Amino acid sequence: MSNILIAPSILSADLAHLQEDVDSVSKDADWLQVDVMDGHFVPNLSFGAPVLKNLKTKLPLDIHLMVENPEERIEEFLELHASNITFHAEVIEDATSRKALIAAIHDGGATAGIALKPGTVLSAIDDCINDVDLVLIMSVEPGFGGQEFIKDVLKKVRALREKFPALMIQMDGGINEETAKLCIEAGANNLVAGSAIFKAKNRADMIKKLRGDS
């Protein structure tokens, strides 16, 4: 097995059968990604902590906060024992505020990630790159599932991997069998996939393909 982590995004799961869908990937996936949207930073609305309270899974919860006020939202997910919480660089640009939020996530027992939209340059996170545990490079505009992969962002992944060999680099958006290979070749080691997994006839096989195991 490779060292590539696969995180199914429940944004693409069937909400009416969420527990069943999560159970169907639990043996093969590494993390479970939860997209939290506020209708402001992105135009869509999605999950909050109440949806997760009744969800049973042993998979680490990876919370992607696509919200304007991440500092006000972390506590509800820390209470649910989130493993990783990622916030967007675009909503907190002040270095002091970023470091305070990262410290609060760490103090709550989770790892901290920072996300970059496709058009945001890597230098935007120079002030906190050494404080986070993960960098999420978005390969679509955040807010909606099923978008086409933006290949240009692979340049950022290569540059990041070259400079930080041990960093967890996550990619999210348009991940399928073909684009997963491109991501891994560029240096990503954590892939988020929604529709590619939950619309697959055999979800376990798809996870293996995304990871490069088959």
Image: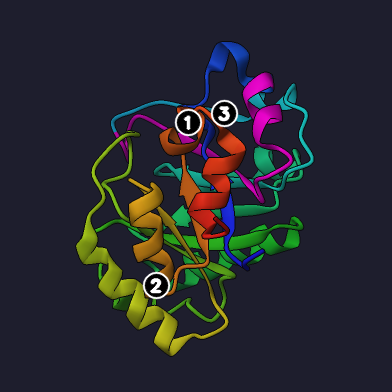
Mark 3 residue type: Gly
Instruction: Work out which quarter of the rendered image holds the N terminus and state it.
Output: bottom right
Viewer-proximal residue among 54 and 22: 22
Return the x and y of residue 190 as percentages of the image width and height: 53, 60
Q: Is residue 1 magenta?
A: no
Q: Residue placed at 35% from the left, 47% from the top?
A: 173
| Residue range highlighted in magenta | 20-42
Say which residue label 3 marks: 48
Amino acid identity at mark 1 = Ala
Describe residue 158's horizontal placement relative to residue 87 as left or right. left
Instruction: Report the Cα–Cα distance between label 1 and label 3.
Output: 26 Å
Q: Note whether 85 is above or below 77 in the view shown.
A: below
Q: Secondary structure at mark 1?
A: loop
Q: Which residue is mark 2?
A: 185
User: Looking at the picture, does residue 198 appear above or below residue 68?
Assistant: above
Indicate yes or no whether the magenta region holds residue 21.
Answer: yes
Quadrant location of the C terminus in the rendered image: bottom right
Q: CA distance from mark 3 to mark 2?
A: 34 Å
- The residue to which callout 1 is attached is 200
Q: Quadrant of residue 10?
A: top right
Q: Is residue 124 visible in the rendered structure shown here?
A: no
Q: Which mark is residue 31?
A: none
